[in-house]
Image (cartoon, helix red, strand yellow):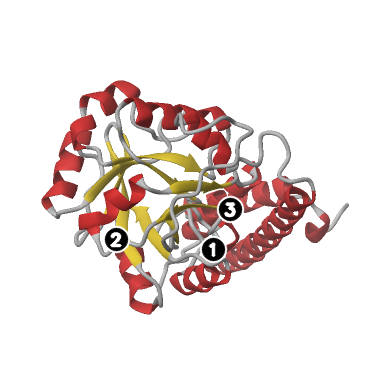
Amino acid sequence: MASKKEEGFEALYGALEGAIAKLEEGNLTLEESITLYEEGMKLAQRCRELLQQADLRITRLQEAFGGGPGIREDASEYVAASGFGEPDDEPPPMSTHPTIRSDLHNHTHFSRDSILSPRDLVRRANDVGLGCVAVTDHNTIRGGLAVREIADFPVIVGEEARSEDGEILGLFLTEDIPEGLPAAETIARIKDQGGIVGIPHPFDSLRSALREETMTDLIAQIDFIEGLNSRIIFPLHNKRAVEFARKHDRPVSAASDAHCARELGRSYVEMPPFSGREDFVRSLRAGRLVGRLSSPLIHLVSRYSVLRRRLGWRPG
């Protein structure tokens, strides 16, 4: 029989889920619980190592083959979808003025499905040349506050709030937005703080996205639409988002939606510098989307992170 280290991710992950289920049943002796907990921690570590190896292999393949059909999406597709040029044209230059790279939707380990620490986020952002990062953890601004405390670049404190109608981004926040509220109330609470409202990964049928009818009903209160999300599985969903934004005259954003360090900087907006929430939307409207999709395997990182929480791990 193959050893645990020789087994694939699926087998290890299944064994980890089984170990957690037994621990949660509470029918083991203390010694049995300790032994199983130790085994679970080893399985979790091996799962993480395999995920890192797989992600590195995918990244190298993308770099070697230019991303490949359905994997890489560069800005020209979004320029074309927005009516500013043809698919084969070079994206038009923004202006002769300086621009910054802004990655506008990311998660730290204050989101239960992310393994990215604030310190690693800052390190990675500097390594890939980002000039601004929005930290938008699920239903909390704790990650944004932690990153802003240590970053040497502008950080937008935000949240990805899960309303009863789907997820909504709030940027430039000072307080948490509770989850489970109607979309209209979620937006109202963001606005009450002077925040900016964005809609993440609309049309994504695999995640909690607002329905098109809901977005249309609330469009007067929506400041921007996320037009390029690197964690999208089907590129058509990004294109539909851009088309919806164009139809309703809303600027589009780009985001890595990072849940681990390697993801950060995959997508961003090249935009003029802005001083704060007052001129953010104007700057975003003048921006250009740049980026590519992550490998679908990256979603396994989130599965691992959730299991790690069930084993008792918590951010410091």
> Where's the C terminus, which quadrant?
bottom left
Q: Residues within 10 Å of mark 3 (few under 14, many from 20)?
A: many
Residue 285 shows up from this direction: yes
**Which amino acid does the dot numbered 3 rest on?**
Val
Residue 110 shows up from this direction: no
Tag 1 or tag 2, which sits nearer the N-term?
A: 1
Closest to the camera, between mark 3 and mark 1, is 3
Between 105 and 270, the one lying in front of the other is: 270
- Residue at point 78%, 46% (across, down): 65
**Residue marked by disc 2:** 141
**Which amino acid does the dot numbered 1 rest on?**
Thr
**Which amino acid does the dot numbered 2 rest on?**
Ile
Between 187 and 269, the one lying in front of the other is: 269
Q: Residue 29 bears which disc, if any? A: 1
Asked if marks 3 and 1 touch (Cβ < 8 Å), the reply is no
Measuring from the top left, give residue 147's x and y in whole percent: 38, 71
Between 80 and 142, the one lying in front of the other is: 80
Answer left or right for 2 relative to 28. Answer: right
Tag 1 or tag 3, which sits nearer the N-term?
A: 1
Measuring from the top left, give residue 29's x and y in whole percent: 54, 63
Residue farthest along the left direction in this orientation: 192
Q: Is residue 262 above or below residue 31?
A: above
Q: How crowded is mark 2: few (under 14 residues within 10 Å), some or many (20 or more)?
A: many
Closest to the camera, between mark 3 and mark 2, is 2
- Residue at point 50%, 36% (across, down): 79
**Residue marked by disc 3:** 301
Answer left or right for 153 relative to 15. Answer: left
Q: Residues within 10 Å of mark 1 (few under 14, many from 20)?
A: few
